[in-house]
Amino acid sequence: MSLARFRAVPGRVHLFNLSPAANSQHKQKRVGRGQGSGRGGTSGRGHKGQKARSGNGKPKAGFEGGQTPITKLIPKRGFVNAEGKTWAPVNLDRIQHWVDQGRLTSSPEKPITARELLSSGCIHNVHDGIKLLANGVEHLKTPIHITPSRASQSAIRAVEKIGGTVICKHYNALALRDCVHGRTDRTEAAPTNRRDILWYTSWKNRGYLSPVAIKTMPAVEERRKVLSEQLTKYKKQAFVQQK
């Protein structure tokens, strides 16, 4: 004796009259269970052939029956550097133009970062960070305080000549996203790559972890002081030389 399934009826909805929507449930397709199942014989796979076989005997994606695949016919040029960075360039004349329009302001306590450059429309994509370039240096008249990821030596000299400051700061993908979105609840990233450590601990590059930057920057947090001390410790270490 089979129990009849309750079917929802118009009116008030109760737990006892809930049921699936009409035609929303189907029986499981069970192949290879004989002719009486409705899918016996070839079970929907057609007649004998490569695609009718079971197991892992089917060709992989891109296989074209033995002829040279199109992926091998197309020539390849160049390569993608896994360690490479794509910087978003910003020039001094463009920054000066945005300052003149009142779309950018800066101070030693609140420098220009990727967030201000992106929100003001000075750049359209931060990529892997901001790089300050010295194109249009003759138009720079206002002292600016900026914190990019990288900066050219000529741009650093031009900004500092009129009383501004440039401090290069390391951002990984998560830290850069937090900077753009204005999040401050997460701990900022520290450089782990040897190339980045050498760059951001050098005052020549105006690295934010260099000892000179730690002394000159206002309101430096304690973690940054500890990182600067740990990452520059190798400069003071002496190695034992074999006699």
Image (cartoon, rainbow, N blue to C red):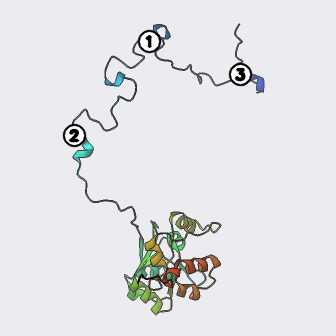
Which residue is under mark 3?
Answer: 8
- Please identify the quarter of the rendering in which residue 52 is found: top left
x, y percentage for residue 147?
A: 51, 78
The residue lying at 57 percent from left, 76 percent from top is 227
Position of the C terminus by quadrant: bottom left
In the figure, is residue 181 to the left or right of 96?
A: right
Foreground residue among 13 and 161: 161
Residue at 48 percent of width and 70 percent of height: 121
Task: From this view, report whether residue 132 is shown above or below residue 216.
Answer: above
Can you identify the residue that label 1 sits on?
40
Disc number placed over residue 76 in the picture, else none: none
Residue type, mark 1 in image: Gly
Residue kind at label 3, given as amino acid type = Ala
Image quarter (top left, top right, bottom left or bottom right) of the N terminus:
top right
Amino acid type of the residue tagged 2 in the rendering: Thr
Question: Within 10 Å of the Cα at label 3, are there few (<14), some (14-19), or many (20+) other Cα atoms?
Answer: some
Query: Can you identify the residue that label 2 sits on?
Result: 68
| Helix, strand or loop for disc 3 | loop
Instruction: Please indicate, yes or no, whether residue 232 appears anywhere in the rendered image.
Output: no
Residue 75, position as x, y percentages in the image: 23, 51
123 up-or-down from 69: above or below: below
Dot placed on the residue nearer the N-terminal end, 1 or 3: 3
List the single residue furthest toward the front. 243
The Cα–Cα distance between marks 1 and 2, rounded to whole angstroms, is 38 Å
- In the displayed structure image, the side of residue 30 where residue 152 appears, left or right: left
The residue nearer to you, when weighing 197 against 64, is 197
